[in-house]
Image (cartoon, rainbow, N blue to C red):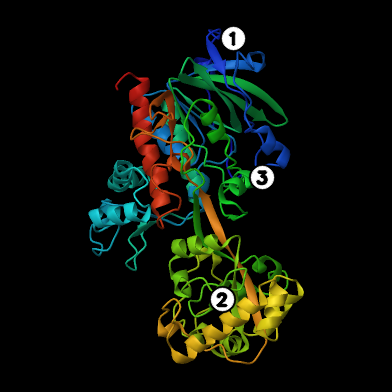
């Protein structure tokens, strides 16, 4: 991801304050939470991020320089960049610090955003975007069991189109996805970091501020109850120096904690596959909590999305991309049998057609579930591809996960070679009978034998008496072995929440009062939007841009006394 270069230009001298320690007798430096290491954090680095108690005057001697600004944005993902750009447009002097050398964060890895009221909807089918605002919001609140902030949900949705149009006016190429999906497809992956760097650099430098890359916030600075800046560690080659940045408003826009296995495990109860950036390790949350922000009751929600089959990684070393992804494709077929680790069936497998619902369903079972294949199923795939089992369209994998150059009618040549190699590598499980397959995969033998027998009866009768799966998806598995079990896990696109925020994106205390000067955007500001699970595709990207767009103005208003 290190595709950027240092975008900082001249003008540093104009922002330099007096020597470190100026006016510090009344200030409290919160304990450092270690955001300096880039990439995947080691367990030692993660341990170093745990904040100690705040101590009066701690860390002053290490500060080599002081900078002043109106608005400090910590984190250069999409939400942080949008906050910085908007605040600068609103007249604030802005400094943005990013611990990596690339701007854009997870936005650079994502596909499409859901919006409401965008001008891109003009001339599109009525299904574009969110055609029925009230129905959409009502469904969102119901899915969250009303344990969220209805006003915050509405604010996000109704402003999402305006925020994306604002980005488009700056040159971000957006395209309606089509097919009735109503989503705005983002431009080519390669242009996104360039866009963020050019637009953010231009905006903050025009404001008299600065973009600081390879600069990791170490601690927030408080004066009384108010957050008034941060200590930032800037890396230049093998050297580092600490800079104090004084600001009237500070935003935590650091991308959550999905790259921190310890925090995820504590929140979820087991490991999930991190599809987010490995450097998103939660240091922003820890700084905010230490500064007095409330760790909300629903902390721990993850943006689970899509099914992952890690057998692909091992098989890719022995087969071309299409055959190596046979097990992955299998996991996206609604006519397969899905069982939990005990061997019991747990859902209508057609749920895989809805990636968010499928991921939440799977996660409820624990770290993984199994997708079962039989000889009859694999023989059909070998002869006529996906179409031979009734899958006449491409499975719902993300585009980057689709094997190249295949269609639903492409035969699965060498299918047994792939699955048997998987069994040899112990990334796929094999058994000649249901009982033997259960033993190989560690399932409860009696439970799986009973489950398999019941499921085959459902397929022969074309009636699913357990979960009501549509008859078209009830494919007879046959009696003849072998059987295979593929381990399927859920992909975590990120965490959400951890800082309760107001409608102005102010960080709130446990008493629901603002921490003066402290704000949050993006992933950190999701606690008031969801209960414990992400509600739908594309709205996370809407939140990233829209929260930054709205928060940027709110911070500028606060810093410039326009409340």
Quadrant that contains the C terminus = top left
> Sequence-wise, which precedes: disc 1 or disc 3?
1
Q: What residue is rendered at 64% in x and 65% in y?
A: 310
In-image side of 73 versus 560 (left or right): right
Q: Are marks 1 and 3 in contact (CB under 8 Å)?
A: no
Q: Residue at x 49, y 41 (%)?
A: 77
Report the Cα–Cα distance between label 3 and label 2. 31 Å
Q: What residue sits right under mark 1 in the picture?
A: 19
- Res. 37 image quadrant: top right
Callout 2: helix, strand or loop? helix
Q: Position of residue 399 (x, y in %)?
A: 50, 65
Cα distance between the residues tagged 2 and 1: 63 Å
Between circles 3 and 2, the one closer to the viewer is: 2
* Number of callouts: 3
Q: Which comes sooner in the sequence, label 2 or label 1? A: 1
Residue 385 visible in the snapshot: no
In the image, residue 151 above or below residue 506: below
Q: Secondary structure at mark 3?
A: loop
The answer to whether 295 is drawn above or below residue 562 in the figure is: below
Closer to the camera, 547 or 506? Answer: 506
Q: Compared to 113, does 509 lie above or below? A: above
Front-most of residues 227 and 325? 227
Q: Earlier in the sequence, mark 3 or mark 2?
A: 3
Packing grade of label 1 (10 A; few <14, some 14-19, many >=20) is: few
Q: Which residue is mark 3?
A: 40
The label nearer to you, 1 versus 3, is 3
Tag 2 residue = 330
Q: Secondary structure at mark 1?
A: loop
Q: Residue at x 43, y 20 (%)?
A: 248
């Amino acid at each position: 991801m290190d595709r950027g270069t240092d975008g900082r230009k001249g003008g540093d001298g104009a922002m330099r304050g007096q020597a470190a320690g100026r006016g510090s007798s009344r200030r409290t430096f919160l304990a450092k939470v270690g955001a300096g290491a880039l990439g995947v954090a080691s367990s030692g680095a993660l341990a170093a991020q745990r904040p100690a108690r705040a101590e009066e005057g701690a860390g002053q001697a290490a500060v080599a320089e002081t900078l002043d600004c109106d608005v400090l944005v910590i984190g250069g993902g999409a939400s942080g960049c949008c906050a910085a750009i908007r605040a600068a447009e609103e007249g604030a002097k802005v400094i943005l610090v990013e611990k990596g050398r690339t701007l854009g964060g997870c936005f650079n890895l994502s596909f499409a955003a859901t919006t409401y009221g965008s001008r891109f909807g003009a001339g599109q089918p009525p299904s574009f975007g969110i055609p029925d605002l009230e129905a959409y919001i009502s469904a969102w609140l119901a899915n969250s069991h009303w344990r969220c902030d209805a006003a915050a949900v509405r604010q996000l949705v109704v402003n999402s189109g305006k925020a994306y149009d604002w980005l488009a006016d700056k040159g971000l190429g957006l395209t309606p996805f089509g097919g009735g999906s109503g989503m705005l497809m983002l431009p080519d992956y390669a242009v996104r970091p360039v866009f963020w760097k050019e637009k953010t650099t231009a905006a903050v430098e025009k404001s008299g501020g600065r973009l600081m890359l390879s600069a990791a916030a170490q601690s927030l600075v408080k004066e009384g109850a108010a957050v008034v800046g941060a200590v930032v560690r800037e890396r230049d080659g093998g050297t580092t120096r600490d800079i104090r940045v004084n600001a009237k408003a500070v935003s935590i826009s650091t991308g959550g904690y999905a790259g921190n296995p310890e925090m995820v495990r504590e929140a979820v109860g087991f490991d999930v596959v991190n599809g987010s950036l490995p450097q998103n390790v939660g240091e922003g949350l820890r700084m905010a909590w230490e500064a007095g922000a409330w760790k909300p009751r629903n902390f721990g929600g993850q943006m689970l999305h899509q099914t992952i089959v890690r057998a692909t990684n091992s098989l890719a070393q022995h087969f071309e991309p299409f055959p190596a992804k046979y097990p992955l494709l299998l996991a996206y077929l609604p006519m397969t049998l899905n069982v939990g680790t005990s061997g019991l069936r747990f859902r209508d497998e057609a749920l895989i057609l809805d990636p968010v619902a499928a991921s939440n369903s799977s996660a409820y079972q624990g770290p993984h579930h199994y997708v079962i294949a039989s000889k009859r199923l694999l023989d059909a795939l070998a002869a006529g591809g996906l179409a031979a089992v009734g899958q006449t369209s491409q499975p719902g994998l993300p585009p980057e996960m689709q094997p190249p150059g295949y269609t639903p009618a492409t035969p699965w040549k060498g299918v047994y070679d792939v699955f048997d190699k998987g069994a040899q590598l112990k990334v796929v499980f094999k058994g000649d009978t249901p009982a033997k397959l259960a033993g190989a995969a560690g399932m409860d033998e009696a439970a799986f034998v009973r489950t398999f027998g019941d499921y085959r009866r459902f397929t022969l009768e074309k009636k699913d008496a357990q979960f009501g799966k549509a008859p078209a998806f009830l494919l007879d598995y046959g009696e003849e072995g072998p059987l295979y079990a593929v381990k399927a896990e859920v992909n975590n696109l990120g965490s959400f929440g951890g800082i309760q925020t107001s409608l102005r994106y102010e960080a709130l205390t446990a008493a629901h009062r603002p921490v003066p000067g402290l704000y949050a955007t993006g992933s950190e500001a999701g606690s008031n939007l969801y209960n414990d699970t992400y509600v739908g595709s594309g709205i996370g990207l809407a939140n990233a841009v829209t929260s930054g767009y709205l928060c940027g103005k709110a911070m500028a208003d606060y810093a410039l006394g326009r409340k």
